[in-house]
Each structure stands twice: as structure tokens, then as C-alpha cells.
Amino acid sequence: MIDIRVQAGDFDPGRQLARLGELKKTAVTGFAGQIETDEDVEHVWVDHHAGLARSELQAIAEEAEARWSLAAIILIHRHGRIAPGERALFVGVAAPDVDQALAACAWLVAQIRTRAPFWRKDVLADGTGRWR
């Protein structure tokens, strides 16, 4: 199972881990990344190309399935306005072996950070912004 979501709203990482935990005889691991930024940033605007983002996340997930014996993958990436400290990314993996689950989760996070077409703009209190 591969579940990919690109959404504006928040998500519950505990619920996503519970979904993965419903699969029997698997090790479950997850990563929930939140927006970290400088003090002068009021919020972050995460932009994306909807079709490209979903297809690249799908490709990354399929590569992970080919590398490891995985029972399930959940990838959630937010877009739009996100405040500092809010969650922006969830990567969850279920695998028959804990080492595979951990390795796949770490690999997925690294691939998403470098390959997924999301762009971040830090918006300052005065309304100006800077793309990162």
C-alpha cells in the first residue's frame, strides 16, 4: 500500500502511525517534520505543482518499495500557509523488519527533501518574503 497526500490542512501523525500499525507482523516507524525558521519569519508559504508533486512522491515511494521489503508507505506533504512549528511532512513506513523500516523512512525523508517539487517562501512580519 502506498498512500500519498498533498494537502493544505494539518494531519495527525499518531493516526497515521496507527493506520500502519493495523498491519500485522510489521515494524512501524515515522517521521513528522515541522516548519523551522528564523525568528523574523511570520509564516512560511509552501508552493508546489500539484501533478508533479504527486507523481514525484509516487516515484520516490515506488523506489523505496523496490529497495526494501515494505508492507506500506504513507507520505503527506502540506502546501500553502504554514506557521513556524506546524507540521509540514509525514513519512510513515511499515515493514516486516525494523531495520528495513528505519532505513526506508530515513531514505524517503532525504529523497523528498531533495527531489520533491515544493518551494518555500519565508514571509516576514512586514509582508516581504524570501524564497528558499
Image: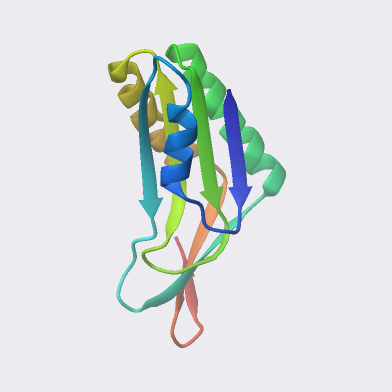
Quadrant of the drawing holding the C terminus: bottom left
Q: Is residue 65 above or below residue 51?
A: above
Answer with left or right where residue 114 lies relative to residue 119. left
Residue 48, position in %: x, y? 62, 53
Determine the image quadrant of residue 17: top left
Nearer the observer, 21 or 7:
21
Nearer the observer, 83 or 15:
15
Q: Is residue 111 above or below residue 120?
A: above
Whether residue 33 can be seen here: yes
Residue 6, position in %: x, y? 61, 47
Residue beneath the point at 46% across and 16% down: 70
Determine the image quadrant of residue 81: bottom right
Whether residue 112 can be seen here: no
Q: Is residue 88 above or below residue 42?
A: above
Residue 79, position in %: x, y? 57, 57
Residue beneath the point at 43% across and 28% down: 21
Quadrant of the drawing holding the N terminus: top right
Q: Is residue 25 above or below residue 91?
A: above
Residue beneath the point at 30% across and 19% down: 98
